[in-house]
Image (cartoon, rainbow, N blue to C red):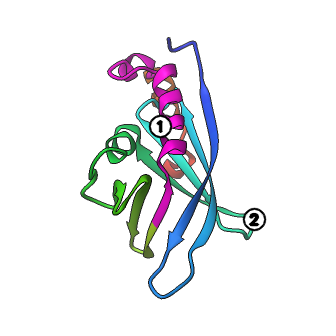
């Protein structure tokens, strides 16, 4: 399976929820790459031509569709009082943000990733030679 390669992209809109402020829609590109089979990347478009990228465990997002998931910098859960939405809470040294998004949109995206790389088969998709080459050729290590 290492010779195969699948990339799944899906646009989404996440609503930034801030206390005492109107909801701000944020365009987000969700990307799944079978070369990194455990992860989903979310690129939050800031509107200034740049993106803020977060990488989440695919299983964390899946678990967050049905119940509270995550204990660290990323927490996902069904939105309180609105089962059709999912709440995503992000924390970092530079700040804290709460987003709400459509559960069906996220669920459809995740379903496509699990069709491409079924649960419990992720290990078969890892390319250890490529990962080692990336690690050894990392310019930051020079």
Find numbered disc 2 in the image and state the secondary structure of the residue it sits on.
Answer: loop
Q: Nearer the viewer, mark 1 or mark 2?
A: 2
Q: Pinpoint residue 35: horizontal percent, then vertical percent.
A: 52, 27
* Position above or below: 80 against 64: below
The question of residue 49 being in magenta is answered with no
Q: Image point 28% across, 50% down: which residue?
A: 69
**Between discs 1 and 2, the one toward the N terminus:** 2
* Position above or below: 33 against 128: below
Dominant SS type (magenta): helix
Q: Image point 52% across, 49% down: which residue?
A: 142
**Residue at image mark 1:** 135
Q: Nearer the viewer, residue 128 or 9?
A: 9
Q: Image point 37% across, 18% down: which residue?
A: 121
Q: Pinpoint residue 111: horizontal percent, then vertical percent.
A: 48, 30
**Toward which corner of the image does residue 76 lie, by quadrant?**
bottom left
- Alpha-carbon distance for marks 1 and 2? 29 Å
Q: Nearer the viewer, residue 20 or 59?
A: 20
As drawn, the residue found furthest toward the bottom would be 20
Whether residue 35 is visible to the viewer of this picture, yes or no, is no
Magenta region = 99-126
Q: Pinpoint residue 60: horizontal percent, then vertical percent.
A: 34, 44
Image disc number at residue 49: 2
């Amino acid at each position: 399976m290492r010779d195969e390669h699948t990339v799944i992209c899906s646009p989404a809109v996440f609503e930034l929820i801030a206390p005492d402020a109107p909801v701000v829609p944020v365009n987000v590109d969700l990307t799944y790459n079978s070369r990194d089979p455990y992860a989903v990347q979310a690129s939050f478009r800031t509107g200034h031509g740049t993106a803020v990228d977060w990488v989440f465990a695919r299983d964390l997002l899946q678990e967050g569709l049905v119940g509270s998931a995550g204990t660290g910098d990323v927490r996902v859960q069904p939105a309180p009082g609105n089962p059709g939405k999912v709440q995503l809470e992000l924390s970092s040294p530079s700040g804290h943000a709460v987003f709400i998004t459509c559960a069906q949109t996220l669920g459809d995206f995740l379903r496509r990733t699990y069709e491409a790389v079924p649960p419990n088969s992720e290990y078969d998709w890892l390319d250890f030679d490529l990962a080692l080459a990336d690690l050894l050729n990392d310019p930051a290590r020079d």
